[in-house]
Amino acid sequence: MTPGRVEATDISGLRHLPAFRADDDRGRFVKVHPRADEPTWDPGWAETYYSTSKRGVIRGMHLQLPPHDHHKLVHCMAGRAIDVILDLRSGSPTFGRHTTIELGAETPEVVVVPPGCAHGFQAVADNTVMLYLVSSVHAPTADTGIVWDSFGCRWPSPPSAVSTRDEGLPTLAEFAAAGHSGWRE
């Protein structure tokens, strides 16, 4: 990835960006937001959280339905993960398609997931720490997703663990049949 460059992706609105990084004899400093080269874009982050996962864990695929949908900024603080983004916006030319992006602490990058796209990842190293910033408050009644093995993703390895909640999410076909719409950009 070229410093300061937004990498093109197959999914409209999905952004893959380098994070500012400064290394010295003390260690490392990383700034994931705000982006100096994108001074006009700020969705107004509402919540920040992180997860820690063992190697092989799959988390996802998660999103919130309108009107509680949100942008999500994702950054790998420790370890490595294969980040997966699935377009669920009805009418989108890439509806049902997904992309994968490898994130690791050694090369600080961020992924900005647009509203209407489900997000998940598989940890490919022990003690993988993923940071998330979201532009809306968690709304349990709007919280949903897609079961991890229903949309053709080739995960790096069989999962070592998936939550009961994530195993119970609808398949891509079930989600599509429900006719969700109203995503905002």
Image (tube, rainbow, N blue to C red):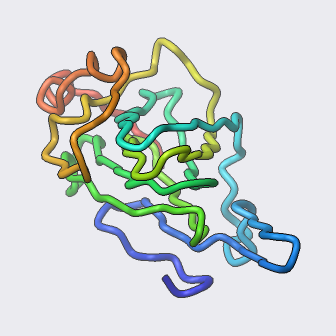
Count of numbered marks: 0
Asked if one can make out residue 55 in the rendered structure from this viewpoint, the answer is: yes
Q: Position of residue 144 (x, y in %)?
A: 38, 23
Residue 156 in the figure: left or right of residue 18: left
* Residue found 51% across the figure and 76% down from its top: 6
Identity of the residue drawn at 55% across and 71% down: 17
Q: In which quarter of the view is residue 14 placed?
A: bottom left
Which residue is farthest bottom?
A: 2
Taking depth in this image into account, of 83 and 172 the one nearest to the observer is: 83
Which residue is depicted at the point 42% across and 27% down? 65
User: Residue placed at 44% from the left, 53% from the top?
Assistant: 81
Relative horizontal placement of residue 111, taking residue 61 as reference (left or right): right
Q: Nearer the viewer, residue 139 or 157?
A: 157
Instruction: Residue 76: give x, y in percent of width and height.
Output: 57, 55
Considering every residue shown, the one lying at the far top of the view is: 141
Tell me: 157 left or right of 143. Answer: left
The answer to whether 74 is drawn above or below residue 172 in the figure is: below
Q: Judge whether residue 121 can be spotted in this image.
A: no
Percent from the top left, x then y, of residue 136? 62, 33
Judge by depth and name the residue closer to the eye, 170 or 54: 54
Q: State whether residue 136 is above or below residue 143.
A: below
Left/right placement of residue 156 relative to residue 104 reads left
Residue 27 rendering spot, x and y as whole percentages: 81, 70
Asked if 2 appears above or below 85 in the picture, the reply is: below
